């Protein structure tokens, strides 16, 4: 059983770059573990640390100004490699929601399979939220998964977001696809007999 | 009703469809490598399950393995543990395993097609985004995460949303010196790195039909680099001829039965796609990337776009990319010195890629300032290169063949490009740090790589009179 997600209000961490690929989220040299734990320590490794392993003071996660369980990123977050380690790193660091104008397909599935909501907002909502965060790092966002709404609490702008019922149900109840599939084995066997 | 190639295969694999449109899709082939499978096997054990259809699953290490002295144990203990974990999982669960030095070992996306493990009409998945490669055989193939590897191990099914469909046609004929890699890099530059997100792409048109099977694998391989879920090409005589002598391909009566299905695998004339795009082959030049995603590419003699031409919202990312690469907006990069050349990967690690590279460097010498890594995609490729004497051509020109694996494409083994160095690479990703922390990657074809390797600079292969 995974952690359930329903309604969340949190401050945010802005990362206003487009096309943040999974090699930036977690570089390949940190993929050698055989468990799901510990990847949060190396989230955005090469942006967070210099080549000698010292914290990079210019990177948002190291400045202490922005905190929270919502990451706000530019468009096409999670492109590139299919590594689920990227989702484990995002979750391991403590994020429950990532906001972007669109997500790479494989990352979106990986996030959903790890109890992270990849929340797609309009370009207008995204631009306004980045501006709110620039003006006031204490800006909060409220995500209401049952109602499928997201609100910028500084400006009051709210909008509806899409998520399919199956995945919404999984997130809200901490279930995963395997629970569903295992309950449907007879259908799989019936399918196999057709061919 | 008219159907696309994708729909014909998708619909045949539907076990069930939920009210919200989510499909329960049956998977014919699962490939596992050492990096994205250990947590899936661990999950299986935690749930007390075994693989549901072990005969449909093939495992092989490729990401971590060294490209020298594979007969010795892997030096890096963490890499070794990951490879040994895969071997143990395959053995414990009765799955086919092609370990290091096994004659069928190599990069999964090279090994699958060359052994006939991937066939037209199949659904194929692997915990690797470049699974899109296999679509060249006329199947639905896509990369998945580790949780989805576990689902497939446990039930041979995945819960998926049907993607939107896009057809990209390339009309006409390619110019001399322009390769399948250039087609793909050109398309990605036009589409941008996220431009096909949410879509599954079918490639069509005269220039695509004219490609060999290996060239088609290169094109489909790079589909993910514009965000596409996968890419595919309708199977035809090229596909059927390619499969004739492949060990796992059906033979005799089984082949006849399969062919009856394979021959129906094309998009009907009036099939409808969500998006249709056409390009002209004559517009495609030898292509090279200058930035930090595969969509940041240009003709090899072109200039990097000026900052003003980039939409305001994208300028920060554009500037960051150029700073990382050590380039200026508006700069021409032809003639720029090169430190490393990498020939290999699931994109360009096949026999034809090495033939092209070898034919180009024959009669030349490797430039002294270049370190070249030539890494065949599999032991079969390696054996074929030896059989054809290509290894000797390469040696005469100052190059050496290494042993198969993913190697410098993602630098999980020792093959890392040092910080700040420029690498012309036939692989698939130029992301920051992809080929090693601080490494600067320029993606290009085997011909452009060969020209760089012998001149020590970014060079248009056509100016050397051989392409």
Image (spheres, coloured by chain):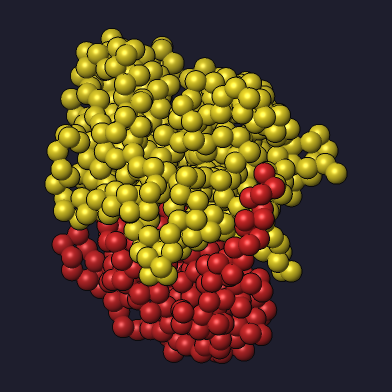
Chain colours: A red, B yellow
Answer with the quarter of the image where residue B190 lies.
Answer: top right
Q: Is residue B183 left or right of residue A43?
A: right
At 41% from the left edge and 34% from the top edge, which residue is drawn? B111
In the displayed structure, would residue B129 be above or below residue B362? below
Q: Residue A170: x and y, percent?
A: 57, 76
Q: Pick the residue in front: B157 or A27.
A: B157
Q: Quadrant of the C terminus of chain B?
A: top left
**Tag count:** 0
Q: Pick the residue in front: B465 or B95.
A: B95
Q: Residue B41: x and y, percent?
A: 37, 60
Answer with the quarter of the image where residue A100 lies.
Answer: bottom right
At 53% from the left edge and 76% from the top edge, which residue is drawn? A175
In the displayed structure, would residue B376 be above or below residue B128? above
Q: Is residue B291 left or right of residue B116?
A: left
Q: Residue B275: x and y, percent?
A: 72, 47
Q: Residue B311: x and y, percent?
A: 56, 56
Q: Is residue B87 left or right of residue B37?
A: left
Asked whether residue B13 appears in the rendered view, the answer is no
Q: Quadrant of the N terminus of chain B?
A: top right
Extreme residue toward the top, this view = B363
Asked whether residue B402 appears in the rendered view, the answer is yes
At 56% from the left edge and 28% from the top edge, which residue is drawn? B250
In the displayed structure, would residue A139 be above or below residue B372? below
At 45% from the left edge and 30% from the top edge, which residue is drawn? B115
Q: Pick the residue in front: A134 or A144.
A: A144
């Amino acid at each position: 059983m995974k952690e359930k997600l329903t309604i969340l209000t949190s401050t945010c961490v802005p990362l206003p770059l487009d096309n943040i690929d999974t090699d930036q989220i977690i570089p390949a040299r940190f993929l050698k573990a055989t468990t799901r734990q510990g990847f949060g320590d190396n989230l955005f490794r090469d942006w967070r640390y210099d080549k000698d392993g010292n914290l990079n003071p210019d990177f948002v996660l190291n400045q202490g100004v922005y905190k929270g369980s919502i990451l706000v990123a530019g468009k096409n977050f999670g492109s590139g490699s299919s590594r689920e380690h990227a989702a484990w790193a995002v979750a391991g660091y403590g994020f429950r929601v990532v906001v972007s104008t669109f997500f790479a397909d494989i990352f979106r599935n990986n996030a959903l399979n790890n109890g992270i909501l990849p929340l797609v907002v309009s370009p207008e909502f995204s631009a306004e939220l980045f501006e709110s965060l620039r003006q006031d790092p204490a800006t909060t966002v409220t995500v209401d998964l049952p109602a499928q709404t997201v609100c910028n609490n500084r400006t009051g702008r709210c909008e509806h977001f899409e998520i399919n019922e199956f995945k919404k149900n999984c997130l809200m109840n901490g279930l995963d696809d395997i629970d569903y599939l295992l309950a449907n084995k007879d259908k799989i066997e019936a399918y196999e007999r057709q061919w | 009703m008219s159907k696309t190639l994708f729909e014909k295969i998708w619909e045949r694999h539907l076990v069930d469809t939920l009210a919200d449109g989510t499909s329960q899709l049956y998977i014919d082939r699962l490939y596992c490598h050492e990096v994205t499978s250990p947590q899936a096997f661990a999950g299986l054990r935690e749930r007390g399950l075994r693989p549901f259809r072990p005969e449909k699953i093939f495992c092989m290490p490729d990401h971590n393995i060294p490209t020298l002295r594979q007969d010795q144990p892997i030096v890096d203990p963490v890499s070794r543990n990951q490879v040994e974990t895969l071997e143990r999982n395959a053995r414990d669960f009765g799955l086919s395993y092609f370990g290091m030095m096994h004659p069928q070992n190599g990069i999964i996306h090279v090994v699958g097609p060359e052994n006939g493990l991937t066939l037209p009409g199949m659904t194929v998945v692997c915990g690797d985004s470049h699974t899109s490669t296999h679509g060249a055989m006329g199947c639905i193939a896509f990369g998945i995460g580790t949780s989805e590897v576990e689902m497939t191990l446990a039930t041979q099914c995945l819960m998926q949303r049907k993607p939107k469909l896009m057809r990209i046609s390339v009309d006409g004929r390619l110019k001399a010196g322009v390769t399948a890699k250039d087609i793909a890099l050109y398309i990605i530059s036009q589409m941008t790195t996220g431009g096909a997100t949410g879509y599954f792409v079918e490639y069509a048109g005269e220039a695509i039909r004219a490609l060999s099977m290996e060239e088609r694998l290169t094109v489909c391989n790079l589909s993910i680099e514009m965000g596409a879920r996968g890419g595919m090409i309708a199977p035809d005589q090229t596909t059927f001829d390619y499969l004739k002598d492949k060990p796992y391909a059906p033979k005799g009566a089984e082949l006849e039965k399969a062919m009856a299905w394979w021959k129906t695998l094309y998009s009907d004339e009036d099939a409808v796609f969500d998006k249709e795009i056409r390009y002209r082959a004559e517009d495609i030049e030898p292509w090279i990337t200058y930035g930090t995603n595969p969509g940041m590419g240009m003709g090899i003699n072109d200039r990097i776009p000026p900052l003003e031409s980039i939409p305001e919202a994208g300028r920060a990312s554009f500037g960051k990319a150029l700073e990382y690469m050590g380039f200026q907006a508006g700069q021409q990069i032809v003639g720029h010195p090169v430190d490393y050349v990498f020939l290999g990967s699931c994109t360009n690690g096949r026999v034809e890629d090495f033939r092209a590279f070898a034919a180009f460097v024959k009669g030349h010498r490797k430039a002294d300032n270049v370190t070249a890594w030539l890494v065949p995609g599999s032991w079969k490729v390696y054996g074929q290169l030896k059989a054809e004497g290509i290894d000797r051509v390469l040696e005469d020109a100052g190059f050496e063949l290494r042993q198969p694996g993913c190697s410098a494409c993602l630098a999980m083994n020792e093959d890392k490009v040092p910080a700040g160095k420029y690498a012309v690479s036939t692989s698939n990703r130029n992301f920051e740090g992809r080929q090693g922390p601080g490494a600067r990657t320029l993606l290009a074809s085997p011909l452009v790589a060969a020209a760089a390797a012998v001149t020590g600079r970014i060079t248009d292969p056509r100016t050397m009179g051989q392409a």
